[in-house]
Image: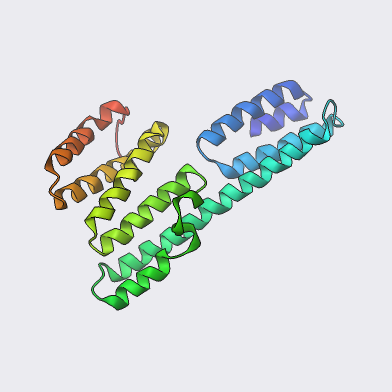
């Protein structure tokens, strides 16, 4: 963004626009919603500086529509982060379900609008929170069948975004550990050994040098 500001102040608007487009692609890939929103502001700033040259009402409306969409996605993932954190705090305080009272307490944390339907998760990170939270809810009930389903979906979602695995290798390794744990409890040993092999080959496949 600093480079965009420099080009803008120098009046190099064509170069500024190219850098903004390049930065936006990178921000979208990594779901950096606040940076995406700031880039939308830069788009309008550039248009105003050039007195709306070669722009029509549809062009302007699209910029603002995109901004509202980005705000919606940011709000959505923030809600998932909030409710997922609440669920984890409860787990660290109470542990596994021992009676109906414990289950009722967890129910109040998981039965919120964002966790009702997977389709409510509007982004990659929101979906991670969704699968992870439902997986935790299954774990506290020792429901290994559902825990396996959500853990597998979590792992597969990560694999669809290899750049995230490279950036956050611990998250992927943990997902494999959780999957192996589930498979062991379900006595699915063939699949468990396959998951162990995936863990062994992960560093080479995703070029993981170290796990911080």
| Image side of residue 34 versus residue 17, left or right | left
Farthest right residue in view: 51
- Residue 152 vs 47, above or below: the answer is below
From the viewer's side, name the closer residue of 148 and 35.
148
Residue 119: where, in percent of width, then height? 48, 49
Residue located 25% across and 48% down the image: 178
Residue located 60% across and 26% down the image: 22
From the viewer's side, name the closer residue of 23 and 113.
113
The quarter of the displayed image where residue 189 is located: top left
Count of numbered tags: 0
| Image side of residue 98 versus residue 66, left or right | left
Colour pattern of the rendering: rainbow
The quarter of the displayed image where residue 174 is located: top left
| Image side of residue 181 versus residue 152, left or right | left
One can see residue 2 in this view: yes
Farthest bottom residue in view: 101
Residue located 57% across and 53% down the image: 75
| Image side of residue 127 versus residue 153, left or right | right
Residue 68: where, in percent of width, then height? 67, 47
């Amino acid at each position: 963004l600093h480079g965009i500001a420099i080009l803008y102040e120098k009046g190099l608007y064509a170069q500024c626009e190219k850098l903004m487009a390049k930065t936006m692609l990178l921000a979208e890939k990594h779901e950096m919603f606040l940076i995406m929103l700031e880039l939308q502001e830069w788009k309008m700033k550039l248009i105003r500086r050039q007195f709306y040259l070669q722009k029509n009402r549809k062009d302007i409306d699209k910029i603002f529509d995109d901004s509202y969409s980005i705000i919606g996605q940011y709000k959505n993932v923030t809600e998932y982060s909030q409710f997922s954190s609440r669920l984890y705090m409860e787990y660290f305080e109470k542990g596994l379900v021992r009676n109906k009272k414990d289950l009722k307490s967890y129910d109040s944390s998981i039965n919120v609008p964002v966790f009702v339907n997977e389709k409510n998760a509007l982004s990659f990170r929101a979906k991670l929170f969704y699968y992870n939270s439902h997986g935790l809810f299954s774990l506290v009930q020792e429901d290994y069948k559902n825990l396996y389903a959500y853990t597998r979906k979590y792992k597969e979602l990560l694999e669809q975004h290899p750049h995230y695995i490279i950036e956050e290798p611990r998250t992927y390794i943990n997902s494999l550990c959780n999957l192996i744990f589930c498979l062991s409890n379900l006595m699915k040993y063939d699949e468990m050994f396959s998951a162990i092999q995936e863990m062994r080959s992960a560093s080479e496949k995703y070029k993981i040098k170290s796990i911080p």
